[in-house]
Amino acid sequence: MTHILVPYHLDEHRPGLDVPYEPAVTVSRDLTGDDVWERVGGLYAEVADVVAADVRGGQVPLVMSGDCMVSQAVVAGVQRAHDRASPSIVWFDAHGDVQTLETTTSGYLGGMPLRMLAGYRPELLADRLGLAPIAEDRIVLVDGRDLDPPERDYLAASNIRQVFTAELDADGVPLGPVYLHVDLDVVDGAELPGLLFPTPGGPSASEVGQAIRRVLDTGRVAAVGLGCTWHEGQDGQGAAERVRAALPF
């Protein structure tokens, strides 16, 4: 597994971002453009190229970043390596990440990446990356428990399947190659210090690690995204070490 670091939170460069694993590759560049989509679009095109080359080389890239939006680049890279064949998605996250620009009250773009992977507003990023939408029935949201009303409405009407961490087994993993996404805030907020958006009532890091192992054991994981969605300086509080001990990467 190739550890790739993208030290950004959206278009904010975070060179001091603590990550659980030593990166073999770091993708960093000067971000230019009139809006956030243009700025991250250039970065993500480079990330997609790195991911595609790694997958073509028979490796499984693990992309670590400070947010979940970089998932657009990882999935685009997998599609490039597989001649645009789309992977299924297993998405571990305390949040739904299915907001839209029209429904969000906070305006936080990090609450939209799963909705965008399912085809929302392709002109924002997907068209720039050559990213094809993922069919909703090929997406599983794991332990999404902090959902705003528009997210609940969308998920209830969609074909996205929702499960708890303990429920996810090999039979519940969608067919085909898999993009495995893990936002570390899926872990109960009391267990990991310093999360940007801690959410109570979740599984332990050990339980998340066991579920991830069940997904990896299918032998179909093509790429992994790891959202290190915490404040700077978490190594001092032991968060990265706890993640290393619990997750099977």
Image (cartoon, helix red, strand yellow):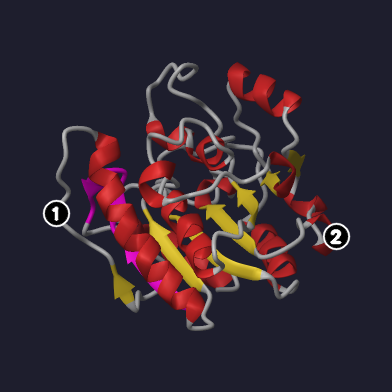
As drawn, 24 above or below 209: below
Q: CA distance from mark 1 to mark 2?
A: 43 Å
Residue bearing mark 2: 171
Residue 56 spot, x, y in % from top left: 49, 78
Does residue 242 show up?
no
Residue with the mark numbered 1:
30
Q: Quadrant of residue 174?
A: bottom right
> What span is colored magenta in the figure?
1-14
Give me the residue at 85% from left, 60% from top.
171
> For the residue marked with disc 2, what is the amino acid?
Asp
Viewer-nearest residue: 245 or 209: 209
Amino acid, disc 1:
Asp
Image location (x, y in percent) of residue 233: 29, 55
* SS under mark 1: loop
Q: Earlier in the sequence, mark 1 or mark 2?
A: 1
On screen, residue 111 above or below 193: above
